[in-house]
Amino acid sequence: MHPHLHTKDNKGCEEVMQILDECHARGFLYKATGGCNAAKRDVNMCLRAERLERTARNRELAKKEREKIKEKWKEIDMNS
């Protein structure tokens, strides 16, 4: 399973998602017999790459925020 495809977080994968949508439009039997497996794998890999970039960016932001908080506590402890 994959998350919702057409969201603001997945803009970099629009092309491969469009290919998957076109493949799915070919019909149920084409999908059921594995005709869309390569397109689905490409979408999953693209979504994974997007998620990894997003989590790395969030991790860096969290580190910066933690450092700010540590500095504030250090300042509070020195003034107490």
Image (cartoon, rainbow, N blue to C red):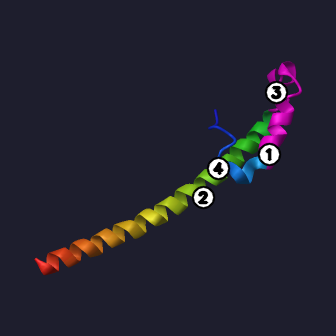
Disc nearest the viewer among 2 and 4: 4
Which comes sooner in the sequence, label 1 or label 4?
Answer: 4
Disc nearest the viewer among 2 and 3: 2
Tell me the amino acid under the disc marked 2. Answer: Glu
Q: Are marks 1 and 3 in contact (CB under 8 Å)?
A: no
Q: Is residue 1 magenta?
A: no
Q: Quadrant of residue 19?
A: top right
Q: Mark 3 — residue?
A: 34
Q: Mark 4 — residue?
A: 8
Tell me the amino acid under the disc marked 3. Answer: Gly
Q: Which mark is residue 53?
A: 2
Q: Which quarter of the image is occupied by the N terminus?
A: top right
Looking at the magenta stretch, what is its main secondary structure?
helix
Q: Read off the magenta span.
A: 15-36
x and y percent of residue 27 in the render?
87, 22
Q: Does dot 3 land on a helix, a strand or a loop?
A: loop
x and y percent of residue 30 in the render?
87, 24
Q: Does dot 1 land on a helix, a strand or a loop?
A: helix
